[in-house]
Image: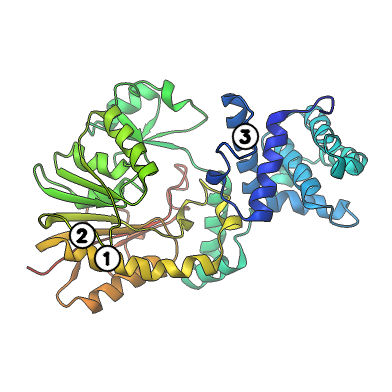
């Protein structure tokens, strides 16, 4: 191993190449066959943090690197350079150590050794970049297939605002088990959001926060907590949480006193849901199965369907998604979502309510699904979302909520979601 080699930085560079070149998602690269396997837990976390930061600001790094490179270097070299630029200019790491570490990474592999002199010269020059020059660079652009779809819906200004929100990343949001957001905010040093979530800014160790061991709260983006709030489950109601894992919405429903059935296709994800229920001392009936074919013993009073989707509303939290996903992968989801809406309605009692939501920015996975469902099911109606904490800009013409990452910009943003409550005819 080359002198001065930093395993965490080296692993971060490998993660970047696997995401950008092989179109793999970060979540699939953290197992026993990934580049993090030999690292200690703290180094694993650091490698992931470095890679995610670079993915979030890669376009800005390229804007500075390109004029200094006579020809594009091989991708592994380019990713080491990108990683170093972002670490110096965005994360504020001391340039001397970053440059030396980048050179050591390149020296450690025979295929990249030839680029050590180039890296040393280019990175030392870029280390002198004024902070205002870096800050003035436009944020990472969304890929063309996604940007075009979003521009047709939100306009160019809306897409620029969304991209700026993505560049800022995402804070940590907590949902209090007892609903007392003020008490939880005081205990963990967070702030109360209008929707009842608690937000913590800055880097924290989740398991070390007060109340974690006691199950007093769980991690859940503030936008992701809204669907269950709109469903407003009553004590004793039979409620089905479709696609339930990892369980944030299941726990909300159970904490409200509902008789909850939580169904998910993945045994691995369901195991995590079971762990979360045990930590919070909440109960739900867990079912591992296919939502499209599963049959309960009796219909439900209410169903919450957080349907499989493109997850384009979570890019600020998962900046690898634009590199790992494509338009071809997403189109089959539209038919799946329609089928799941139909199934969810079939599982409801007459007069029952369905909250349909997706963590997507695409109208095809939100507004269009609701419009089509109304046409397929005579008598089905959207119940307009009403609550004092709902802001006017969130409402869509159908009566649902369209949430975007650039909303709450002064508070740290939120995940993108579409949420609508549908009432089955009696």
Q: Are marks 2 and 1 in contact (CB under 8 Å)?
A: yes
Neighbourhood count class around disc 3 (C-alpha, 10 Å): few under 14, some 14–19, many 20 upward: many
Left or right, 40 with respect to 314, comes to right
Image coords of residue 364 (percent x, y): 41, 70
Tell me the distance, in whole angstroms, between the alpha carbons under discs 2 and 1.
9 Å
Image quadrant occupied by the C terminus: bottom left
- Residue at 63% across / 59% down in the picture? 141
- Judging depth in this view, the residue of 315 and 182 nearest the camera is 315
Mark pair 1, 3: CA separation: 39 Å
Q: Nearer the viewer, mark 2 or mark 1?
A: 1
SS state under label 3: loop
Please provide percent x and percent y for residue 139: 63, 53
Seen at 36% across and 20% down, the residue is 210
Dot 1 or dot 3: first in sequence order is 3
Mark 2 residue crowding within 10 angstroms, few (<14) / some (14–19) / many (20+): many
Q: Secondary structure at mark 2?
A: strand
**Quarter where residue 362 is shown:** bottom left
On the image, numbered disc 3 is attached to which residue? 36
Classify residue 257 as left or right of residue 177.
Answer: left
Q: Which circle's residue, 2 or 1, is located before the other in the chain?
A: 1
Q: Secondary structure at mark 1?
A: helix
Residue at the (53%, 47%) spot, across then down? 318
Q: Which mark, residue 341?
A: 1
Q: Position of residue 181 (x, y in %)?
A: 28, 32
Q: Residues within 10 Å of mark 1 (few under 14, many from 20)?
A: many
């Amino acid at each position: 191993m080359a002198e001065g080699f930093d395993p965490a930085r080296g692993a971060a560079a490998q993660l970047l190449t696997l995401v950008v070149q092989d179109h793999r998602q970060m979540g699939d690269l953290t197992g026993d066959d990934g580049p993090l396997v030999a690292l200690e837990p703290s180094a694993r976390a650091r490698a992931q943090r470095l890679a995610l930061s670079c993915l979030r600001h890669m376009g800005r790094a390229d804007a500075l690197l390109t004029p200094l490179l006579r020809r594009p270097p091989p991708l592994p070299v380019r990713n080491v350079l990108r990683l170093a630029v972002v670490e110096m200019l965005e994360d504020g790491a001391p340039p001397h150590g970053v440059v030396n570490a980048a050179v050591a990474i390149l020296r450690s592999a025979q295929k990249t050794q030839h680029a050590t002199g180039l890296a040393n010269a280019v990175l030392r020059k870029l280390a002198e970049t004024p902070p205002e020059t870096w800050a003035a660079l436009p944020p990472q652009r969304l890929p063309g297939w996604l940007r075009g779809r979003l521009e047709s819906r939100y306009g160019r200004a809306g897409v620029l605002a969304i991209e700026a929100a993505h560049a800022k990343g995402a804070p940590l949001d907590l949902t209090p088990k007892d609903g007392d957001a003020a008490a939880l905010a005081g205990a963990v040093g967070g702030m109360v959001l209008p929707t009842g979530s608690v937000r913590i800014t800055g880097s924290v160790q989740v398991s070390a926060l007060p109340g974690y061991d006691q199950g007093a709260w769980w991690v859940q983006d503030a936008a992701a907590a809204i669907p269950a709030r709109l469903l407003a489950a009553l004590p004793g109601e039979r409620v089905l949480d479709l696609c339930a894992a990892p369980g944030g919405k299941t726990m909300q429903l159970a904490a409200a006193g509902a008789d909850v059935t939580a169904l998910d296709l993945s045994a691995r994800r369901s195991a995590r849901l079971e762990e979360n229920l045990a930590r919070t001392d909440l109960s739900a009936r867990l079912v591992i199965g296919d939502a499209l074919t599963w049959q309960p013993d009796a219909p439900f009073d209410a169903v919450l369907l957080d349907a499989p989707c493109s997850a384009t509303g979570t890019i600020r939290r998962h900046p690898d998604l634009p590199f790992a996903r494509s338009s071809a992968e997403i189109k089959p989801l539209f038919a799946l979502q329609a089928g799941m809406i139909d199934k969810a309605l079939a599982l409801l009692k007459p007069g029952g309510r369905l909250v349909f939501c997706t963590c997507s920015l695409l109208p095809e996975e939100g507004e269009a699904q609701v419009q089509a469902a109304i046409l397929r099911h005579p008598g089905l109606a959207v119940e307009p979302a009403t609550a004092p904490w709902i802001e006017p800009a969130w409402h869509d013409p159908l009566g649902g909520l369209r949430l975007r990452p650039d909303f709450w910009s002064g508070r740290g943003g939120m995940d993108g979601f579409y949420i609508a409550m549908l009432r089955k005819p009696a």
